[in-house]
Amino acid sequence: MRIDDILEQRRPCFSFEFFPPKDDEGVARLLATIGELEQDDPGFVSVTYGAGGSTRTRTIEMVTRIRRETNTEVMAHLTCAGSTRDELQDVLGELRDAGVENVLALRGDPPAGDSEWKPTPGGLSYSTELAALVSADYDFAIGAACHPEVHPEAPDMAWDIGFLKDKVAAGASFLISQLFFDSDLYFDFVEQVRAAGVTVPILPGIMPITNYSQLKRFTEMCGATIPDRLDRELAPVAEDKKAVEDLGVAYATLQCSDLLARGAPGIHFFTLNRSPATRSILAALRAARPWDRARSLV
Ligand code: FAD
């Protein structure tokens, strides 16, 4: 089923993002995890596309197998990075032939070791071009990324939202946000995007914290801030894996609850392939049902 249709029918919509495992054993484990997740009735799951296009084959294989072997709807991430236009068309053809209906059209991050984004010769420069390429020749529901704290390469929010509008005009029918830890950032962002005339659903992207140094690395890369009040609790327990995970689950639960009570249409979880943390958050949310308190959707 197309995710834009799912988002019309299902509020809140919970989705789970995974990266493709490196070996067959990992693939089997992830398929089993997704099978177990069916009890949580996710709106969809998605599979990332490695930096620089490095996991192309494994992403296609994983998405194809989820489509074939589970009852959960799936979305393939696809990036401009490391591929020519023809290669992107090939990937899209494979996904279509496998019956996949949803694609997240992204520019992509540079491969590990490169700090600067450089388009591949014969390839595309921005996600807008990818969304246009997909919508011109295929019937996928197209999602795209958005950045509540401004994309790190954009000079300001107005510039970034201008291109976000172009992405939607090029065919994106829903957006998923970059990770953030202060819900006000999301609501301020949604307000600005709506004022710019963009009406498609914007799923907040939430990463339950499981590792402090990884958190620092990710936030530096994507330009997200860690609120001081959160850092003050995390920093002293940084070396205590269990304490970081417990705090991460508790914080994400409170944050998701706040988002849903204030009208967010769902939550997209960056699971980092650690589904137990995410499932605990989801169980607590289902028990508390914060969305029943939402007066209207943002
Ligand atoms: P774009 O929309 O292309 O924007 C990038 C920058 O260019 C922005 O500053 C924008 O303002 C500017 N811009 C856009 N169009 C133009 C234009 N026409 N002219 C000039 N400037 C322009 N990365 C991966 O490698 N693999 C993944 O699987 C992956 N999954 C992700 C999932 C989610 C939910 C999110 C939020 C991010 C994901 N990323 C992934 C990271 C993403 O690739 C990076 O955030 C990347 O730096 C930007 O991607 P984008 O699609 O937003 O880029």
Image (cartoon, rainbow, N blue to C red):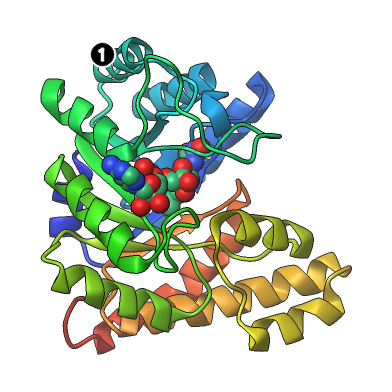
* Rendered position, 120 above or below 284: above
Regarding residue 124, the answer to whether it shows in the image is yes
Q: Residue at x 10, y 65 (%)?
A: 197
* Rendered position, 261 above or below 196: below
Q: Quadrant of the C terminus?
A: bottom left
* Residue 144 pos. (x, y %): 30, 46
Left or right: where 280 falls relative to 5: right
- Which sits in the foreground, 14 or 51? 51
Most extreme residue toward the right is 239
Quadrant of residue 229 within the rendered picture: bottom right
Instruction: Name the residue type under label 1.
Output: Asp
Left or right: where 160 falls relative to 117: left
* Residue 124 pos. (x, y %): 35, 26
* Residue 14 pos. (x, y %): 36, 59
Could you tell me how many numbered marks the image carries? 1
Quadrant in which ligand 1 is drawn = top left
- Which sits in the foreground, 55 or 24? 55
Q: What element carries label 1?
A: helix
Residue under pointer 1: 97
* Residue 54 pos. (x, y %): 57, 24
Quadrant of residue 86 within the rendered picture: top left
Left or right: where 158 falls relative to 48: left
Regarding residue 44, the answer to whether it shows in the image is no
Quadrant of residue 75 within the rendered picture: top left
Left or right: where 240 falls relative to 263: right
Q: Residue at x 18, y 88 (%)?
A: 295
Q: How crowded is mark 1: few (under 14 residues within 10 Å), some or many (20 or more)?
A: few
Q: Quadrant of the N terminus?
A: top left
* Rendered position, 80 above or below 86: below
Q: Residue at x 37, y 78 (%)?
A: 259
Q: Which residue is drawn at 64% across and 41% down?
A: 115
- Which sits in the foreground, 182 or 159? 159
